[in-house]
Image: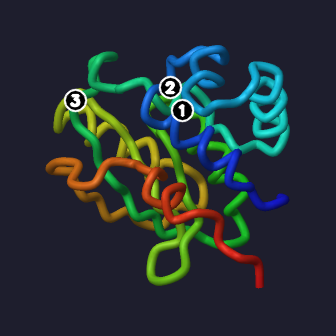
Amino acid sequence: MHPLDSTDTRLLIALAKDPRRTVVALAQKLGLSRNTVQARMAQLEKKSVFLSFERRINPVALGYPLMAFIHVHVQQQKLATITGQLADIPEVLEAFGLTGQADILVRVVCADAEDLFRINGKILGCDGVERCDTSLAMGELVPFRVEPLLERGPRAAG
């Protein structure tokens, strides 16, 4: 991916502060033409700079007030199969391959402790899963953010 320039960064900061702002409003705010903003937005989209809108939907509104992180220990040769099986569990929000003691970190949401027990059972039932260590999230201390990185500016390559 080509590095972002200062105009891209300014545009992303403005969007981070007010994601509903129109192209015209962004152009006015940044002192750019509407066409420049539209072209930059198209280029940023093409570079896969934007994450899906889905990441902005709060699972609590869907009836899942609890979040847990599950460290999954697996048989490495079955990792691809396990990944597919995890993707079939609706309550699995995301999963990351890890270094260290566990092989996969899975973030799940659930309605209550009984629901978490059920979800944990589904994960343990995946062929190749050896064991799980589950931690209930007590609260979000630092929410997902990128703005501090944007304000610092693009990191030099190398």
Between marks 1 and 3 in the image, the one whose residue lies nearer the viewer: 1
| Picture coordinates of residue 27, whole percent (x, y) | 65, 24
The residue carrying mark 1 is 15
Q: CA distance from mark 2 to mark 3?
A: 25 Å
Residue 37 vs 145, above or below: the answer is above
- Left or right of 41, for residue 140: left
Q: CA distance from mark 1 to mark 3?
A: 28 Å
Q: Quadrant of the C terminus?
A: bottom right
| Picture coordinates of residue 139, whole percent (x, y) | 17, 48
| Picture coordinates of residue 13, whole percent (x, y) | 52, 43
Q: What's under tag 2, amino acid-wise?
A: Pro
Q: From this viewpoint, which residue is outermost toward the front? A: 31
Check residue 65 in the rendering and tell me which mark sits there, or answer none.
Answer: 3
Q: CA distance from mark 2 to mark 1?
A: 5 Å
Check residue 19 in the rendering and tell me which mark sits there, or answer none.
Answer: 2
Of 103 and 150, the residue lying toward us: 150
Within 10 Å of the Cα at label 3, are there few (<14), some (14-19), or many (20+) other Cα atoms? few
Q: What's under tag 3, amino acid-wise?
A: Pro
Query: Cβ–Cβ below 8 Å for labels 2 and 1?
Result: yes
